[in-house]
Image (spheres, rainbow, N blue to C red):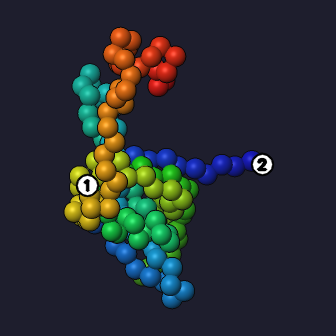
Amino acid sequence: MASYNRVILVGNLTRDPELRYIPSGTAVSEIGLAVNDRVKKNDQWVDETTFVDVTLWGRTAEVANEYLSKGSNILIEGRLKLDTWEKDGQKRSKLRVVADKMQMLGSRDGGARGGARAAASRPPQEESYDEGFSSASAGGFPDDEIPF
């Protein structure tokens, strides 16, 4: 029987990343992600928020800790993992996402903890796309060089 375990989520951090290192020296970071969905209930649109715990490993965990903070908008791609344990004689479980990829969304320094540091390492802005092209055609691009 075939199976497929992939998750793609876009949402906002509910808290600052919590970075730690395991004994082997590998970085691990735990983040909380709020994912919003609009559903129609009783003829009205209502926002429903789902809160997801996400685990980041390695360099991804370090980058998240350096550049992200509560409220940052990110995309996560990963897999679901069910953790189970026993506490006070009761079996407990929790579903979480183990991230394989993380993409920071929005402005480079908007919502980022290291805003000045991120801006300082950024390459200079490029000139506008239509520089050097005639403005006779759509958007200043020659008809055979429209960028889509």
Residue drawn 44% across the image and 82% down it: 21
Say above or below: 147 vs 64: above
**SS type, badge 1:** loop
Q: Residues within 10 Å of mark 2 (few under 14, many from 20)?
A: few
Residue 73 got which mark? none
Look at 41% across and 71% down and name the residue there: 62
Residue 148, given in percent of the width and then of the height, sits at 48, 23
- Towards the viewer: 22 or 86: 22
Q: In the depicted view, which residue is nearer to us: 114 or 128? A: 128
- How far from the left and from the top, in percent, is residue 79? 56, 56
Which sits earlier in the primary sequence, circle 1 or circle 2? 2
Question: In terms of image quadrants, where is residue 100?
Answer: bottom right
What residue is rendered at 27% in x and 37% in y?
Answer: 47
Q: For marks 1 and 2, give the one nearer the viewer.
A: 1
Residue type, numbered disc 1: Asp
C-beta proximity under 8 Å, tags 1 and 2: no
Q: Position of residue 138 (x, y in %)?
A: 37, 14
> Dot 2: what SS?
loop
Is residue 147 visible in the rendered structure shown here? yes
Farthest residue to the bottom: give it. Answer: 23
Report which residue position mark 1 lands on.
109
The residue carrying mark 2 is: 1
Point out residue 45 in the picture as x, y percentages from the top left corner.
Answer: 26, 28
Between 139 and 107, the residue placed more toward the observer is: 139
Q: Please tell me whether residue 116 is drawn above or below residue 11 in the rendered image.
A: below
Whole-number angstrom distance, CA of label 1 to CA of label 2: 46 Å
Q: Amino acid at mark 2?
A: Met
Left-right relation of 69 to 10: left
Query: Neighbour class for label 1 at 10 Å: few (<14), some, many (≥20)?
Result: some
Please report the residue visible at 35 percent of the width from the left and 48 percent of the height from the top: 105
Q: Tell me if residue 69 can be seen.
A: no
Would you place residue 56 above or below residue 27 in this image? above
